[in-house]
Image (tube, rainbow, N blue to C red):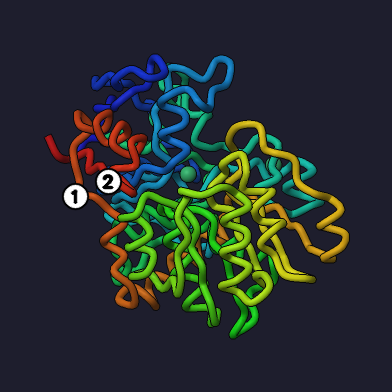
Amino acid sequence: MPIPTSTRAAVLTAHGQPLTVGEIPLPSTVKPGAALVQISCTSLCGTDVHLWNGNMTFDGMLPMVLGHEMVGTVVAVGDGTVDTLGRTVSVGDRIGWSESTCGTCFGCTVLREPVACSSRGYGFMQRSDRPPYATGGLVEYCYVTPGAAKLLLPDTVADTHAAMSGCAAKTVLRAFSRVGGIRPGSSVVVQGAGALGLYATAFAQISGAGRVVTVGGPDDRLHAATRFGATDTVGLSGTPQDRIEHVTELTSGGADYVFDFAGAPTVGEEAIGMAAQRGTVAIVGSTGPVPAPVSLGTVMGKELSVVGSLNGDIADYYRAVEFFGTFGDRFPWDELFSAPVGLGSASDALASMHRLGEIKAVVDPRLP
Ligand SMILES: [Zn+2]
Ligand SMILES: [Zn+2]
């Protein structure tokens, strides 16, 4: 098949407005190390919703293509393109990928942490009017840059699971890794009942937690949390102090681990309050508005460990894909995903996620 020279795309041209569906160019050649992929599944993330409605915005970011959780089939490949394990990537292969990194900056070479790359490509650096134009997920054909770490996907992992591994799942895996894993039988609080919170709830259960308390809303999401392994759920109707007291009671004095996957203004204050003496608090979701102050005296008095965790890299992506390969039947994962829609319905899907309707919208750009 001839290599396409342009692609259908849903482009964000103004915050809060419907995406513009039309054609955007593709690079004229596929560079060494790069691939052109026909997207079969893009799942949308909370960050896409924040970028769409303007809660998250950067100077000069528009017009851009949203979407950074996607998977597809290679239709053209540059010379020498290999995946992160050094395996040759060929036309017809199904691949997923993580953010692009430069490989030469301080973060890449001294820290050896891809998330610390000073020119890390991510979901808000996807201008559609500059080469290589189509690097986001809401396109029919996506250009996967040479610097993006790619992974040949096993047939046993569903498209939705591989797509979600691209951000939500790998973010959760990294957070659990950042706290050193959790001790079997320990108590875990998950703040947030969105896709990350529900996935983290299941991950804590599979990791051997004795008690998993999911804090969030609305009620239908808390009901879902029980199907994903929560032993207890706490809603958002009371005050932060009410929630702290409730969780402290459920965990007989406080939780060994508290994971913030919510990012609401009071999550830090609540996390510190819910943690047990010598507990660990992981901050993962706090991209949002100005936080309420936390009591440093409590951090000191309880001897808490506070850990930040930022998204994830190709290692976390690999582990997330491996996780779904192992536990794809363990929980009702499909509850997280809506039925796939075409690019023309992506705006409605974002609006629905914003209203806390759909947990994770799915776009198949091949659909009309
Ligand atoms: Zn770098
Ligand atoms: Zn994301």
In the drawing, does residue 340 fall left or right of residue 270? Answer: left
Q: How many marks?
A: 2
Which of marks 1 and 2 precedes in the sequence? 1
- The quarter holding residue 129 reads top left
* Residue hosting label 1: 339
Asked if residue 346 is positioned above or below residue 200 in the image, the reply reads above
- The quarter holding residue 263 reads top right
Residue 346: image x %, image y %? 26, 33
In the drawing, does residue 51 fall left or right of residue 263? Answer: left
> Which sits in the foreground, 228 or 254?
254
Tell me what residue is drawn at x 52 percent, y 20 percent: 61
Q: Residue furthest left?
A: 368
* Residue hosting label 2: 362
Q: Residues within 10 Å of mark 2 (few under 14, many from 20)?
A: many
* Kind of residue at badge 1: Ala
Q: Which mark is residue 56?
A: none
Asked if residue 20 is positioned above or below residue 153 in the image, the reply reads above
> Which structural element holds mark 2?
strand
Distance of label 2 from label 1 (alpha carbons): 6 Å
Tell me what residue is drawn at x 56 percent, y 37 percent: 121
Residue 332: image x %, image y %? 29, 69
Residue 283: image x %, image y %? 66, 52
